[in-house]
Amino acid sequence: MNFKSNLPLFFLFLSVLLTSTFAIRLPTRHQDPVRELTQCVQQCQGQHQHQRQQQQGSSSQRCIQECVQDFQQRQHGGRSQWELVDVMINPRRDDPVRQLQQCQQDCKRHGQDRDCQRDCVEEFLQDIQRSRHSIDEVDDDSENQGRQTYRECQQRCQRERGSQQYECQRRCQSDSRRGDRYDVEEELDNPYHRDQQQHRQCQQMCQRQGRGFECQRRCVEQIRRQQERGQHGGRQYEDEEEYMNPRHHDPQQQYRECQQRCQRQGQGYECQQRCVEQIRRQQERGQHGGRRQYEDELDDMNPRHHDPQQRYRECQQRCQRQGQGYECQQRCQQEIRRQQERGQHGGRQYEQEMEDENPRHHDPQQRYRECQQRCQRQGQGYECQQRCQRELRERHPVLAAFMEVTGLF
């Protein structure tokens, strides 16, 4: 009797249990698997930061792999959403999960475990975030209307200025995510497509130059910084232009501040090259006249005092003591070259060295290799190679430290 009276309650409890079980295991149509994957990986990162003092980094890696495996098991139209994301981001590359594992293995080989693996995870999350703007299907019925709406929105944005123009373009992109893949000009106006294109070009440059994980990590960092600057008003290079304003500083002060800004942002050779090019353009436009401040330095280079190599070294040392960078060293090279052309000193003993010193021709690793080859051609041994290494350490300390860790020195 008691069992019969409790039977309806038993079935009610069973139905609630089954319903809750299926609700947990079967995601609804409104859930975003990409967002869930991102949150899952971020939780793993948070646990990893808490466990770093206990040296349990492997648990974070297992946690991330479990997030990815759960994500892969979800099907979308007979095909896993992960495959759709992978095709949209990297149509010619391997599975991003495999890339994450390869990145972590590279970290272990290079002896850079914790921070390096954190960078791998951040790169993985960056790809996931970019993919969210690429997996929406095109609605054929509203294709023409979507294009027209996008053009009109872009035209309205042209009337805006500064950060408001960038925010307007972002709103256009957000409103037209279901539209077609527009023509080339409109794709270039899209900051998200522009970020992906820049990332691919940066990685291709790393491959052409034979540079590995460190170069690709810098590509990811560069894109991340550009996106962060874009989210805070689209001032990608406006801060650099502001620092380079001739009304604020003299050229030397501008160059030093620009280099310091490159170091703070973790940008290397390319950023310093932009500093140099900006100073050169200002000088060519005549915004900074007068070159008397270096005439005393040029007088010290009188050929009656020293041989060309000694004068060149002293000039470089003087540039370093005074905190002057690329422009000062360029003047040292130009003065030596002019004296040689006037016939005051015959031979081309140091012209090739000065040519190789020009950072417009090669990247730092290429200049280091050419310096070593020059030592071999001239029959100079250990001391010459040490000079090459010292030069690389002085100009590019981060790259030199990386080469020491990887055994390239």
Image: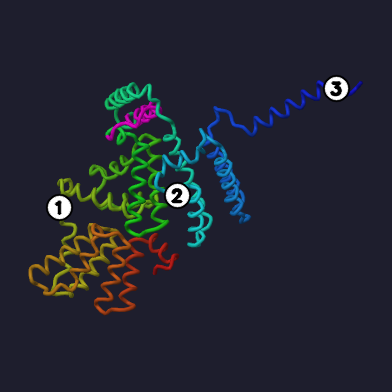
**Quick one: which residue is furthest to the right in this view?**
1
For mark 2, what is the residue?
A: 94
**First reached walking from the N terminus: tag 3 or tag 1:** 3
Compared to 5, does 94 lie above or below? below
Q: Distance between the residues labelled 3 and 1?
A: 100 Å
Residue 139 higher or lower than 326, as above or below: above
Instruction: Give the Cα distance between marks 1 and 2.
Output: 57 Å
Image location (x, y in percent) of residue 287? 17, 45
Amino acid under label 1? Gly
Q: Position of residue 352 (x, y in %)?
A: 20, 68
Q: Name the residue under label 1.
A: 290
- Residue at point 29% right, 41% down? 242
The residue wearing badge 3 is: 6
Q: What residue type is labelled 3?
A: Asn
Q: Bounds of the magenta span?
A: 165-184
Quadrant of the rendered structure where residue 179 is? Answer: top left
Q: In this rendered view, identify the residue nearer to me: 366 or 395.
A: 366
Q: Quadrant of the N terminus?
A: top right
Judge the density around disc 1: few (<14), some (14-19), many (≥20) Cα neighbours within 10 Å. Answer: few
Indicate the amino acid at tag 2.
Asp
Q: Which of marks 1 and 2 is nearer the N terminus?
A: 2
